[in-house]
């Protein structure tokens, strides 16, 4: 079973019967990436966060992975934790993971919150991941962290504690775990499920995350009734880089005052 952590709602907010929120991570991060969101939601929801295969304290797989396998892991974890239905928050790699899980088991999801991710790979993204896998293999995960922190965060934050923490998280990711899941991101297509999403859906994207805002606007247009919000002054990890604004939008969507 994947490494996971549960925070229970307080009795005055329903305890074990309170709604569930499940957080799904990006590549090269662990469940601590959601610390600010857990702090904002603590006591009011039951919260599950977990390390994807090869990340954090989860076991490193011997073989490369697929989005199908990662989505099966999510459903298996819901079963293991006896979660009948949840709000799912997926970041980057967590977006196709959540979409594939929704395709297989839509009744398990009450809401979707999709953050800085896309519904399908492309020829360009496949080539980019090939390049990054080759770089990591040749230079190791510390060098990968050097490169990735500069790409994911706004320049003025790279040298701050925020950047240092992220650098340590990426550098601690096992090379085999990175390669296994980066391979999954080279070939997937969950576009067809977008039109079938029948739960409230919010897309959030860092305004400075390259082409991702345009990509996510197209995704939002394909999901019935979906809303999208861009988070200013944030790159690929808006929940981590701008937790104040991210949490305000999250709480509003969850209708929490």
Image: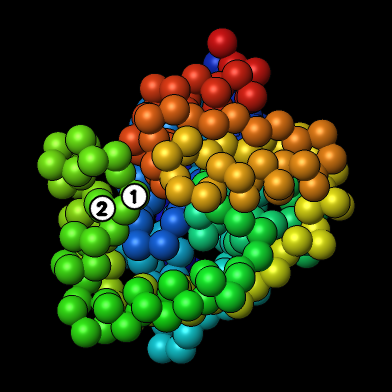
Circles 1 and 2, Cβ within 8 Å, touching? The answer is: yes
Image coordinates for residue 210, horizontal then vertical, percent:
46, 48
Residue located 74% across and 50% down the image: 108
Task: Give how far apart the Cα atoms at labels 1 and 2 are.
Answer: 5 Å
User: Residue 190 lies in what quarter of the image?
Assistant: bottom right
Residue located 26% across and 53% down the image: 149
User: Residue 159 lies in what quarter of the image?
Assistant: top left
Say which residue label 2 marks: 149
Image coordinates for residue 34, horizontal then vertical, percent:
40, 41
Position of residue 34 relative to residue 249, above or below, is: below
Residue located 20% across and 35% down the image: 156
In the rendered image, the residue lying farthest to the top is 257
Residue located 19% across and 60% down the image: 146
100 vs 233, nearest the viewer:
233
Q: Quadrant of the C terminus?
A: top right
Q: Secondary structure at mark 1?
A: helix
Image coordinates for residue 176, horizontal then vertical, percent:
33, 81
Q: Residues within 10 Å of mark 1 (few under 14, many from 20)?
A: many
Q: Secondary structure at mark 2?
A: helix
Say which residue label 1 marks: 152
Tell whether 238 sits left or right of 143.
right
């Amino acid at each position: 079973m994947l490494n996971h952590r549960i925070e229970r709602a307080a009795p005055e907010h329903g305890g074990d019967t309170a709604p569930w929120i499940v957080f799904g991570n990006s590549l090269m991060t662990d469940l601590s990436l959601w610390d600010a969101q857990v702090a904002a939601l603590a006591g009011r929801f039951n919260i599950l966060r977990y390390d994807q295969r090869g990340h954090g304290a989860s076991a490193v797989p011997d073989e490369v992975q697929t989005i199908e396998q990662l989505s099966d892991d999510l459903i298996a974890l819901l079963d293991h934790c006896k979660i009948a239905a949840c709000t799912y928050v997926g970041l980057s790699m967590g977006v196709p993971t959540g979409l594939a899980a929704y395709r297989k088991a839509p009744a398990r999801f009450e809401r979707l919150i999709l953050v800085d991710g896309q519904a399908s790979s492309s020829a360009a993204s496949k080539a980019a991941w090939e390049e990054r896998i080759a770089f990591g293999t040749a230079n190791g995960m510390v060098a990968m962290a050097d490169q990735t922190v500069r790409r994911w965060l706004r320049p003025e934050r790279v040298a701050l504690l925020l950047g240092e923490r992220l650098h340590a998280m990426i550098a601690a990711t096992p090379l085999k775990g990175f390669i296994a899941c980066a391979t999954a991101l080279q070939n997937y297509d969950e576009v067809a499920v977008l039109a079938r999403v029948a739960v409230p859906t919010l897309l959030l994207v860092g305004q400075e995350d390259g082409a991702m805002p345009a990509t996510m606007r197209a995704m939002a247009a394909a999901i019935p009734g979906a809303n999208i919000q861009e988070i200013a002054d944030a790159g690929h990890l808006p929940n981590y880089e701008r937790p104040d604004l991210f949490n305000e939008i999250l709480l509003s969507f969850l209708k929490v005052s």
